[in-house]
Amino acid sequence: MNTPSLKETIDTLNSVYKDHISREEAASWAFNIIKNDDIDIENEYLWDLLDIISGIDTKESLESDYFHSKEQIEEWIEYYKNVEKQTK
């Protein structure tokens, strides 16, 4: 498994927002990257976004909605797109 780029990670979050992949799939993907000792993540923005995505499937309770709203996901997408533009 290779270190994803910030763009790839934003694209994954965007796929969740557009319901192309489930929150659980994205969270599992991000968690597997974070826990992999062979992957060295030096970009703090990438690390933060992977951390966010790894918890995107969190619910307030078993019967409730997700803790993070679609609006919050959209805000993260916009924020990290701006970060990506500034760090190129």
Image (spheres, helix red, strand yellow):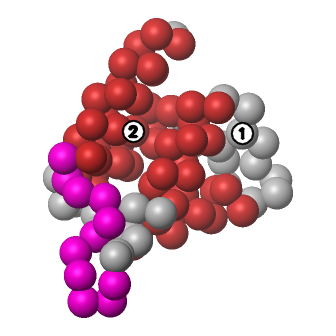
Instruction: Say few, some or many: other residues with alpha carbon within 10 Å of mark 1 (under 14 / 14 to 19 / 20 or more).
Output: some
- The answer to which of marks 2 and 1 sits earlier in the sequence is 2
- Residue shown at the point (53%, 13%) measured from the top left: 87
> Does residue 69 show up magenta in the picture?
yes
Magenta stretch in the rendered image: 61-71
- Residue shown at the point (82%, 53%) measured from the top left: 38
Q: Amino acid at mark 2?
A: Ile
Quickly name the residue at label 1.
41
Q: Amino acid at mark 1?
A: Ile
Q: Foreground: 21 or 31?
A: 31
Left or right: residue 75 compared with residue 29:
left
Quadrant location, the N terminus: bottom right
Question: Residue extending furthest front?
Answer: 60
How far from the left and from the top, in percent, is residue 13? 35, 48
Left or right: residue 76 compared with residue 46:
left
- Residue shown at the point (57%, 31%) measured from the top left: 45
Numbered circles on residues, count: 2
How far from the left and from the top, in percent, is residue 71? 19, 47
Q: Main secondary structure of the magenta part?
A: loop
Question: Residue extending furthest bottom?
Answer: 63
Q: Does residue 26 appear anywhere in the picture? A: no
Is 77 above or below relative to 88? Answer: below
How far from the left and from the top, in percent, is residue 82? 37, 19
Q: Which element type, helix, strand or loop, lies under badge 2?
A: helix
Left or right: residue 68 compared with residue 8:
left
Is 3 above or below relative to 52? Answer: above
Indicate which disc residue 10 carries: 2
Q: Foreground: 52 or 32?
A: 52
